[in-house]
Image (cartoon, rainbow, N blue to C red):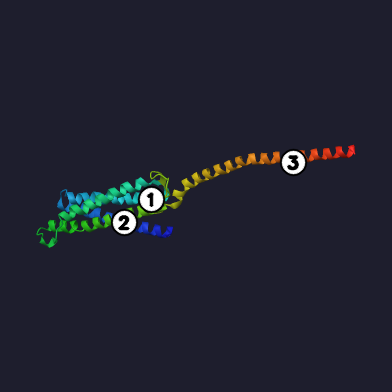
Amino acid sequence: MISDPIKIGIACSIRLLQFVFGLVQMALGARSDAVADSIVVESTANAVWGAFTVIYVIVTFILSFFNKRSLLSFIIPEAIIVVFQLTGFAIVAASYPTNCDYYYWTESKIFCQNYKPILPMAVLNFILFVADLVLFVIFTIRDKKEGIPIYKNQSFLIGGIFPKKDSFYAAESGANTNYQIEPQTQQFETRQPQNNNIETFESANSKNEYDEKVRSTTTTLEV
């Protein structure tokens, strides 16, 4: 069982790396466009996706301190970023320059030098987002009890990857409390007839004893 401090450490490490790689990816894409003095689809796309990654990581990290989130609000953007990063390194790999020294013009060489590092940044971010999505799904399924809908808001540990167990159990514990009270009430109600029967039986015994005393007294007087 992994303790909460270890989970927080893993989540913060993953978020920090995602932020750094996304920032570098955004900067390299923007720099490549600036050197080319035009919009290059591959570098522009990676610059936009790097910026989206940076914004998402910052917002997610901040919200993990304060607000609850639904599970779908985590899965959907994470899955979108995974697709973005996969597409990002795929389009760069399709036009990946093997050696920047082959370029004669200085601008082309600088563009190549800024363009090539985009690929590893996109690959690393893709791996990191796949990893935190897998961790989230594993721990959510393991910690989640049946009957709690996936769209309900849950609290997350710092970093916004690992859900808190208490948030899953709180709703169900309330339901269990209500469920346990009802049988006790029923048991109490079912005992009432038994008590009435006992009282009736005791009354009958007392009456029989009284009748016997009366008969014995009458017999004595007759004698």
**Disc 2 residue type?**
Ala
Task: Please indicate whether residue 35 sits to the left or right of residue 78 in the image.
Answer: left
| Residue ID at (86%, 38%) | 219
Which residue, as the protein is rendered here, is positioned at the far left? 104
Q: Quadrant of the N terminus?
A: bottom left
Tell me where residue 60 appears, x and y as whole percent: 36, 50
Q: CA distance from mark 3 to mark 2?
A: 78 Å
Q: CB of mark 3 within 8 Å of CB of mark 2? A: no
Q: Relative to the observer, which residue lies in front, 210 or 129?
A: 210
| Residue ID at (37%, 59%) | 10
Tell me where residue 153 appears, x and y as whole percent: 41, 45
Tell me the number on the disc at residue 131.
2
Q: CB of mark 1 within 8 Å of CB of mark 2? A: no
Categorize mark 3 by other alpha carbons within 10 Å: few (<14), some (14-19), many (20+). Answer: few
| Residue ID at (24%, 57%) | 123
Tell me where residue 80 appears, x and y as whole percent: 28, 48
Residue identified by numbered label 1: 62
Q: CA distance from mark 3 to mark 1?
A: 77 Å
Residue identified by numbered label 3: 205
Task: Please indicate whether residue 100 sits to the left or right of residue 160 in the image.
Answer: left
Tell me the number on the disc at residue 53.
none
Mark with earlier residue (3, 2) = 2
State whether residue 199 is above or below residue 92: above
Categorize mark 1 by other alpha carbons within 10 Å: few (<14), some (14-19), many (20+). Answer: some
Mark with earlier residue (1, 2) = 1
Find residue 108 and report its image quarter. bottom left
**Disc 3 residue type?**
Asn
Q: Secondary structure at mark 1?
A: helix
**Disc 1 residue type?**
Ile
